[in-house]
Image (cartoon, grey):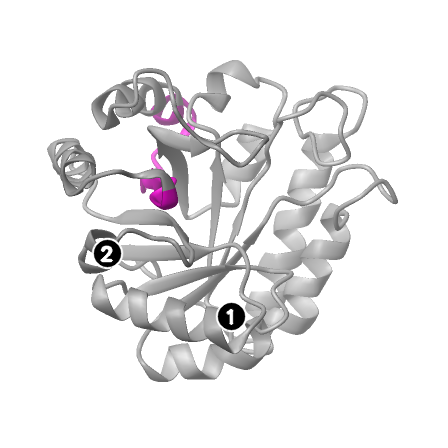
Amino acid sequence: MAGFANKGLWIVYLDTQEDENRLFHNAQLMGAGAVAIRSDSSRLTTCMARFKAANFKVYSWRWPAVVQNQGGRFATDEANYVAQTLIPAGLDGYIVDPESEQDGASNDWNRIDVPVAQLATTFGQIIQKAAQAAGRADFVFGITSGQDYPASRPHIPWKEFVAVSDALFPQVYWRARDNNDVCQLVKDGKPDSAFDRALPCWRAIANGKPIIPMAGELGCVRDRQELTAFAQRAKKEVLTKMHFYADEPQLYPFIKTL
């Protein structure tokens, strides 16, 4: 699969030299071939050269807004930022994260009162045209979202986003933080159960596109056995590429040698 590495490590906040150094170090230790940095990170454009010189692919990601001036970067503004700033700086790919955690929020894509389907198409086209104009035939586009969202959030414009995607990244989380930033089990807290919920609905929308499962949240994982179970199930499903969310200061030591 052109562009996507066998392992990828994501990060939310990359705003300090310490953040950059930690991500670089941990990505090397786990044998990652790519990092995925949220697009509003202040050091994204300046750190790209360092990561690419070390043979990492550098992707970016974001949960863009669908309502203007109500919080978050509006979708077309985000797409234009990727097109006009990040791709010229050397970005290798972009993974859009259309979510729906709060009904009617500015970044809630699961709705019928906003033309989200057209917005998704426009979003992808802006980025793809910029990559083509830059001669980046190797540039890749992906989509990630919640574990069972293709089934439970039917109004997210799956068809439109999948149409412009090179791969799909289901969030196969068995532990995650709640709104109070406290780690909680997702359902029964088992990687196998997370795969059981995620794969059928993501395969139903994939339209032949590759699926790359994303483990998480790493800061909530308690032992190596959980990650081993995730990797074993991924390989059993013939999903040989895996991503991990997300690098942070309090990762347990065993995660750094994943």
The residue depicted at 31 percent of the width and 72 percent of the height is 25
Query: 69 or 140: nearer the eye?
Result: 69
Task: Measuring from the top left, give residue 157's x and y in whole percent.
Answer: 61, 29
For badge 2, the amino acid type reads Pro
Residue, disc 1:
91
x then y, percent, for residue 150 = 48, 22
The quadrant in which residue 179 appears is top right
Within 10 angstroms of label 2, few (less than 14), some, or many (20 or more) residues? Answer: few
Residue that extends furthest to the right in the rendered view of this protein: 69
User: Which residue is nearer to you in this view: 115 or 251?
Assistant: 251
Residue 230: which numbered mark, if any?
Answer: none
Residue at the image position 14 percent from the left and 37 percent from the top: 225
Q: Earlier in the sequence, mark 2 or mark 1?
A: 1
Q: Which mark is residue 253?
A: 2
Q: CA distance from mark 2 to mark 1?
A: 29 Å
> Was residue 53 drawn as part of the magenta stretch in this picture?
no
Residue 195 lies, in percent from the top left, at 27, 25
* Residue type highlighted by circle 1: Leu
Secondary structure at badge 1 equals: loop
Whole-percent x, y for residue 207 in the image: 39, 31
Residues in magenta, as a range: 202-219
Left or right: 101 with respect to 176? right
Disc number lying in front (2 or 1): 2
Residue in the picture at 35% in, 32% down: 172
207 within the magenta span: yes
